[in-house]
Image (tube, grey):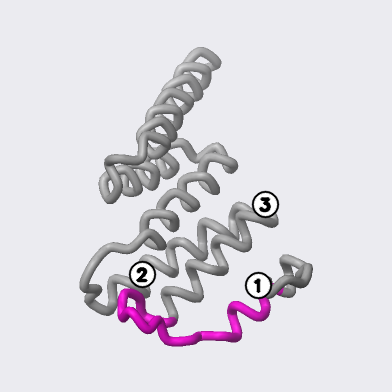
C-alpha cells in the first residue's frame, strides 16, 4: 500500500490492470492476476467470485509449465478452500485444502482446515439424510 490507505475495490481494479511479469518466472502473468483477484474477492467476502478466480488462476497456471511451486500457489488453494467453505461446498473446500496441504505438509493449518471441511461435509450429509 506504499504507506497510504487504499480501498480494497480500488486495489482490485489496479491489480487486474497491472498484468506485470513475475521476474522469478514462477507464474504466467495472467495466473498471477487471477490469484490476486481471488484474494481480493475473498477479502470482500464475494465467495462466488473468489472460487471463480481461483479456478481461472489454476487453469491459466496449468497452461504454462512452472518450474517450482511457490507460496502463492499454496495460498491460492487455501483461499479457494476458504471461499468454498463459506459457500458450504464442503467437498470442494476439502479438495482445495488438501491440495494446499499436499504442497505444504508442514503447515498444520492446512490439514486442520481439510479435516474440518470433511467433518462439516459429513455432518451436512447426515443432516440431509435424516430429513429425507
Relative placement, left or right, of 8 versus 121 is right
Tell which circle, 3 or 1, labels the residue nearer the N-terminal end.
Answer: 1
The residue identified by callout 1 is 12
Asked if the magenta segment contains residue 60, the reply would be no
Q: Residue 59 — which label?
A: 2
Instruction: Describe residue 79's horizontal placement relative to residue 115 as left or right.
Output: right
Question: Which one is in front in this view, the residue at disc 2 or the one at disc 3?
Answer: 3
Q: x and y percent of residue 59 in the render?
A: 36, 69
Which residue is depicted at the point 65% across and 72% down?
12
**Separation of marks 3 and 1 at Cα, in angstroms:** 13 Å
- Pointer 3: what residue? 45
Task: Name the element at disc 3.
Answer: loop
Q: Secondary structure at mark 1?
A: helix
Q: Residue furthest front?
A: 3
Q: Earlier in the sequence, mark 1 or mark 2?
A: 1
Magenta segment, which residues? 11-29
Amino acid at each position: 500500500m506504499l504507506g497510504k490507505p487504499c480501498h480494497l475495490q480500488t486495489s482490485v481494479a489496479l491489480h487486474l490492470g497491472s498484468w506485470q511479469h513475475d521476474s522469478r518466472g514462477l507464474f504466467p502473468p495472467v495466473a498471477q492476476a487471477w490469484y490476486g483477484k481471488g484474494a481480493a474477492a475473498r477479502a470482500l467476502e464475494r465467495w462466488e467470485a473468489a472460487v471463480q478466480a481461483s479456478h481461472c488462476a489454476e487453469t491459466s497456471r496449468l497452461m504454462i509449465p512452472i518450474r517450482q511451486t511457490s507460496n502463492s500457489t499454496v495460498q491460492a488453494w487455501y483461499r479457494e478452500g476458504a471461499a468454498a467453505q463459506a459457500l458450504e461446498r464442503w467437498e470442494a473446500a476439502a479438495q482445495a485444502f488438501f491440495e494446499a496441504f499436499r504442497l505444504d505438509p508442514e503447515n498444520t493449518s492446512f490439514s486442520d482446515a481439510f479435516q474440518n471441511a470433511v467433518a462439516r461435509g459429513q455432518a451436512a450429509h447426515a443432516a440431509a439424510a435424516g430429513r429425507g
